[in-house]
Amino acid sequence: MSAIPPGLLQAIGAPHPDIAPLPPAAPTAPDVRVLRGVPYGLVDGGRPLELDLWLPSAADRAQGPVPLVLFAHGGAWRRGRRDDMGMRTRDWSPGPFARIAAAGFAVACVDYRLSGEAIFPAPLDDLRTALGWLTLRAAELGVDTARTVVWGESAGGHLASLLALGTEAVGTEAAGAVIWYGPSDLTEARGAFDPRSPATPEALLLGAAPAAVPELARAASPVAQVHGGAPPFLLIHGEQDTMVATTHSEALAAGLREAGARVELRTVPGADHGWYGLPEDEVEDVFAHSLRFARELVG
């Protein structure tokens, strides 16, 4: 058999995400368009990493690059979909991302590797890669990644917190973070979480019981990464959360305040994880509060 020509090996693969053509944008809610399944990163031996990009109206974009919300989905680091902001928003019309875009943001809903694919810090690396890709192609996309608000719920809130606390790793700084009921401490028992158990979602994320890998557990804990230069945080958590104890947000808020960073903590009476049990008007109010906070950060 003759040797494979080098040119064939180079040509046979799809273009690298850094230079690949963007897919066409499709209309969705009034004046909002969305690009679905945009590749942003490659993992050797793994699936391509993709994001959906929601774009605001042409009138907003005509005024110059628009601010960005980078959204990380929940699912215990084990499952979930990039286009899902949680069970209480799934039936909204327009949906939550269209609403954020209608407020003048571009919204990047980002895939990341789940714990069945790779252990921490892989999912955080993926979010950083996504922000780097968005920055690389910012002019083409019409976005201003210097005005990025990271937004996450549950496991995605955990990753969004870490991203906001370390965006200098990709050469930019987040303008702020909106975190819904996110874990912040993988080192200590909180609620039903036991760091000695090898069967928890946290253990699956780390590849071992957190107590068995204390340095990795600390690196994966936002409470251990706070610093005075952190961007503003909005932390919202249900007071009856049975899956992620409210003390996670309380501890992160206390750490940020002690470090001298700006933080707002809102605990929601009657709300379990995912806003389960909360009346619809109060879920709407939580969303409106979050969007208002993000909008104030970027001007």
Image: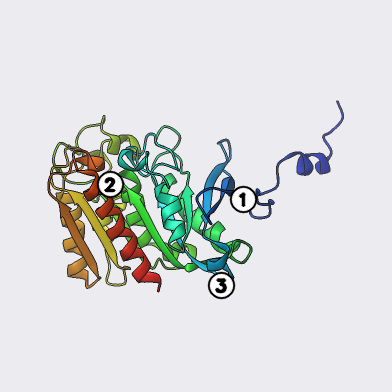
Q: On the image, numbered disc 2 is attached to which residue? A: 217
How far apart in space, not on screen, are marks 3 and 1 (Cα)? 18 Å
Picture residue at 21% right of the left edge, 64% below the top = 264
Left or right of 5: which side holds 94? left
Res 181 visible: no
Q: Secondary structure at mark 2?
A: helix
- Image mark for residue 64: 3
Q: Is residue 274 left or right of residue 254?
A: right
Q: Residue at x 56, y 72 (%)?
A: 64
Looking at the rendered structure, the kind of residue marked 3 is: Gly
Disc nearer the start of the sequence (3/2) = 3
Which is nearer the eye, 8 or 158? 158
Report the amino acid beneath label 2.
Answer: Ala
Q: Nearer the viewer, residue 22 or 202?
A: 22
Residue 251 drawn at (x, y percent) = 16, 56
Above or below for 178 versus 75: below
Position above or below: 166 against 77: below
Q: How many marks?
A: 3
* Residue tagged 1: 25
Q: Earlier in the sequence, mark 3 or mark 1?
A: 1
Q: Residue furthest top?
A: 1
| Residue that lies at the very extreme toward the right in this rendered image | 2
The span from disc 3 to disc 2 (Cα, nearest Å) is 41 Å
Q: Position of residue 185 (x, y in %)?
A: 22, 49
Q: Earlier in the sequence, mark 2 or mark 1?
A: 1
> Does the image show residue 73?
yes
The residue sitting at 17% across, 46% down in the picture is 188
